[in-house]
């Protein structure tokens, strides 16, 4: 199990390393392919290669790796989780949903899988399921800023602005340095015509180092 979560950690780091140049990514992938040729049955190496494929948006190559792993071990948590992500990016929503559900049957309560499933259902217009799932996630993880922000995002998308404003406020209270949460609440406050509250959010963002120029559109809406 430790190897599974190490693999997940690797992929999480890989997915966040967007600053790397395409050449560096391709070189890393080439090295992974070369190493894999010596150890073709290594699950860890295949997971790493698939991580580089994802970073390069080579969705089919990544899915092929996860398919290979899951044929050999249908309960590999890392492969299920990231194949769900790849399936979603390819528009294969039913397959992505099945991967998340299978993962949750293995690891009930898995935060990221529950979040992914809720967001997938929202994207696929399964609104009732999405709201039920995100409400359940918030109930299970009441100290998670991510859970509140995700619910706020769903509510905002569906026009439930008062609820969205509340959830982003909860997220900000739990993670006050997260500028994305403040930005979303400012936008919602503008939509709710709470201009002074929106202005305060924008000023906090500026104090936190967000360039005022990047907020120009929101400031214009306050006039």
Image (spheres, grey):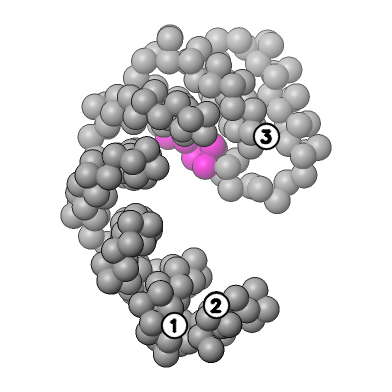
Question: Which stretch appears magenta?
Answer: 4-12
Mark closer to the chain start, 3 or 2: 3
Q: Is residue 135 left or right of residue 19?
A: left
Q: Is 98 on the left or on the right of 30, as rendered?
A: left
Residue for badge 2? 218
Q: Main secondary structure of the magenta part?
A: helix
Whether residue 209 appears in this view of the structure is: no
Q: CA distance from mark 1 to mark 2?
A: 9 Å
- Residue drawn at point x = 40 percent, y = 74 percent: 191
Q: Quadrant of residue 40?
A: top right
Residue picked out by circle 1: 198
Asked if 203 appears above or below 162 in the picture, the reply is below
Q: Quadrant of the N terminus?
A: top left
Do labels 1 and 3 touch, CB within 8 Å? no
Percent coordinates x, y for residue 65 in the rendering: 55, 18
Q: Mark 1 packing: few (<14 Cα in 10 Å), some, or many (20+)?
A: many
Sooner in the amino-acid sequence: mark 1 or mark 3: 3
Residues under labels 3 and 2: Cα distance?
33 Å
Horizontal arrangement in the rendering, residue 137 relative to residue 191 (left or right): left
Quarter of the image where one finds residue 143:
bottom left
Which is nearer the eye, 31 or 146? 146
Closer mark to the observer between disc 3 and disc 2: 2
Residue 164 painted magenta: no
Say if 79 sits above or below 151 in the image.
above
Residue 53: image tag: none
Q: Which mark is residue 56?
A: 3
Dot 3: few (<14), some (14–19), or many (≥20) neighbours within 10 Å? Answer: some
């Amino acid at each position: 199990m430790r190897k599974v979560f190490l693999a997940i950690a690797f992929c999480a780091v890989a997915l966040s390393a967007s600053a790397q140049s395409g050449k560096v990514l391709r070189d890393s992938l080439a090295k992974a392919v070369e190493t894999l040729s010596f150890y073709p049955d290594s699950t860890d190496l295949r997971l790493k290669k698939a991580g580089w494929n994802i970073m390069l948006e080579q969705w089919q190559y990544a899915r092929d790796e996860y398919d290979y792993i899951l044929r050999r071990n249908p309960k590999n948590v890392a492969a299920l989780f990231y194949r769900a992500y790849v399936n979603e990016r390819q528009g294969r929503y039913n397959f992505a949903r099945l991967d998340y559900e299978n993962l949750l049957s293995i690891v009930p309560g898995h935060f990221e899988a529950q979040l992914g499933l809720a967001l997938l259902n929202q994207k696929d217009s399964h609104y009732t399921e999405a709201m039920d799932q995100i409400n359940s996630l918030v109930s299970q993880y009441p100290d998670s800023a991510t859970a509140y922000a995700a619910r706020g995002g769903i509510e905002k998308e569906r026009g439930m602005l008062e609820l969205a404003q509340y959830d982003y406020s909860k997220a900000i209270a739990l993670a006050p340095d997260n500028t994305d949460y403040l930005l979303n609440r400012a936008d919602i406050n503008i939509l709710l015509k709470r201009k002074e509250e929106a202005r305060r959010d924008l000023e906090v963002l500026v104090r936190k180092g967000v360039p005022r120029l990047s907020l120009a559109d929101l400031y214009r809406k306050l006039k």
